[in-house]
């Protein structure tokens, strides 16, 4: 029985050396700032956390398997180590054909392999060579050479080079291994379907608070993508992850990942005294897209529900926050939560304000405004 580690893959980026060695995080190095893929085992607070952490560290950084490790984990680690050994050999062979200055990122190669194939089977040398070849293309180059008489002339030749584009890598892997990798990226989803401004998305992505996950289907035949909204603690360690499906078809879903600490749900802290409070990360980003003037001066938190732990924690940790502004949904549940949280804030000495959307939620307001703007523009061109 395969351990359900692969089923808990979520995208989180920590692109520096510290991030690569942080317990629980494995980096799939990305060259595009908008396609952020990381393998994050969300085992925060789980009984299996120590085993998951140890398995990741051994697979990617070596070491001996503890005697206390369950046999299922031992089998998966040994299989992964064997596959990684063949991948390392394939990477070395590919790089031996490259020119000086060119090379593959072995962590990137192995992390994507881990996300797609962990626990499935032991792969042959040929399969590993095929996988590594998905990260390489050929490029026509020129160089100066001498003929027999000592005269120089320009020669054209073909050189293998690393592929920088992850979508190209994914397309190569999908074709080589006959699997489907669904390319619903979070930027297109958040902008086209939700109307959120690109610069807002990029700001949160740059601060490593929004990522994209790549998770295999139950039968392993497809890869599904989700937007993951990460909440960190005061040391910038991830403590909460809220996942929302990016599917353009079929039923969508959203959930807080197992082991998440509600105190640290998706948030951003500014310098002003205002703390804007929302039910969902999408509504938080929508509100900022609607009211962009000086938005980075203020603080924002998404409850990922209607509980008040995240508000209280932000107020306790940041004394400069004096004015909570409740921007919850304009429905029965949202209004009841607003009344309850207002009373809770008053007990703590805060006079909370309320700002309700004119429609059900702030994303509906944003999409409606953009639709009206498009309709007016269309009428003007007629």
Image (tube, helix red, strand yellow):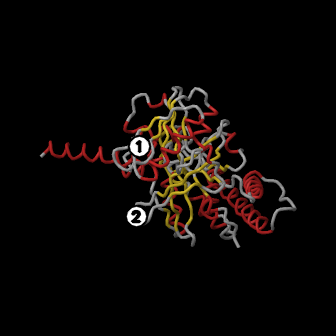
Q: Secondary structure at mark 2?
A: loop
Nearest the eye: 290 or 188: 290
Crowding at dot 2, Cα within 10 Å, few <14 / some 14-19 / many 20+, comes out as few
The label shown at residue 249 is: 2
Looking at the rendered image, the disc whose residue lies closer to the viewer, 1 or 2, is 1
Choose top left, top right, bottom left or bottom right for residue 115: bottom right
Q: Is residue 125 left or right of residue 171?
A: right
Q: Is residue 69 visible?
A: yes
Q: Pointer 1 and pointer 2: residues touching (CB < 8 Å)?
A: no
Residue 229, percent across and down?
Answer: 54, 48
Choose top left, top right, bottom left or bottom right for residue 131: bottom right
Q: Is residue 226 left or right of residue 97?
A: left
Outermost residue toward the right in this view: 67
Q: Is residue 159 left or right of residue 327?
A: right
The label shown at residue 286 is: 1
Is residue 192 positioned above or below 145 on the image?
A: below
Residue 208, percent across and down?
Answer: 56, 41
Q: Is residue 159 visible?
A: no
Residue at (59% x, 42% y) in the render: 310
Is residue 219 positioned above or below 17 on the image?
A: below
Q: Secondary structure at mark 1?
A: helix
């Amino acid at each position: 029985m395969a351990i359900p580690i692969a089923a808990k893959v979520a995208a989180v980026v920590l692109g520096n050396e510290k991030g690569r060695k942080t317990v629980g995080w494995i980096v799939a190095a990305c060259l595009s700032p908008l396609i952020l893929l990381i393998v994050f085992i969300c085992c925060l607070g789980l009984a299996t956390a120590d085993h998951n952490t140890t398995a990741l560290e051994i697979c990617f950084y070596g070491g001996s398997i503890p005697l206390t490790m369950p046999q299922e984990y031992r089998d998966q680690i040994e299989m992964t180590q064997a596959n990684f050994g063949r991948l390392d050999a394939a990477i070395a062979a590919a790089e031996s054909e490259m020119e000086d200055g060119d090379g593959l990122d072995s962590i990137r190669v192995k992390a994507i392999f881990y996300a797609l194939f962990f626990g499935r089977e032991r792969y042959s040398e040929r399969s590993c060579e095929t996988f590594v070849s998905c990260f390489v293309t050929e490029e026509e180059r020129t160089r100066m050479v001498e003929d027999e008489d000592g005269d120089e002339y320009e020669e054209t030749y073909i050189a293998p080079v690393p592929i920088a584009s992850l979508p190209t890598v994914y397309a190569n892997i999908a074709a080589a291994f006959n699997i489907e990798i669904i390319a619903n990226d979070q930027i297109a989803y958040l902008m086209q379907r939700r109307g959120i401004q690109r610069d807002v998305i990029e700001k949160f992505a740059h601060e490593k608070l929004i990522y994209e996950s790549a998770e295999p289907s139950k039968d392993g035949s497809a890869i599904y993508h989700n937007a993951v909204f990460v909440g960190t603690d005061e040391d910038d360690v991830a403590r909460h992850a809220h996942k929302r499906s990016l599917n353009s078809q079929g039923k969508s879903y959203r959930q807080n990942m197992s082991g998440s600490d509600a105190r640290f749900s998706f948030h951003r802290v500014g310098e002003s005294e205002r703390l804007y409070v929302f039910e969902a990360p999408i509504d938080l980003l929508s509100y900022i897209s609607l009211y962009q003037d000086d938005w980075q001066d203020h603080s924002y938190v998404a409850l990922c529900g209607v509980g008040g732990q995240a508000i209280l924690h932000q107020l306790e940790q940041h004394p400069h926050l004096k004015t909570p502004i409740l921007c919850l949904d304009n429905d029965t549940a949202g209004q009841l939560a607003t009344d309850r949280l207002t009373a809770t804030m008053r007990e703590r000495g805060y006079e909370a304000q309320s700002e309700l959307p004119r429609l059900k939620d702030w994303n509906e307001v944003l999409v409606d405004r953009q639709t009206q703007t498009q309709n007016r523009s269309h009428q003007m061109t007629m």
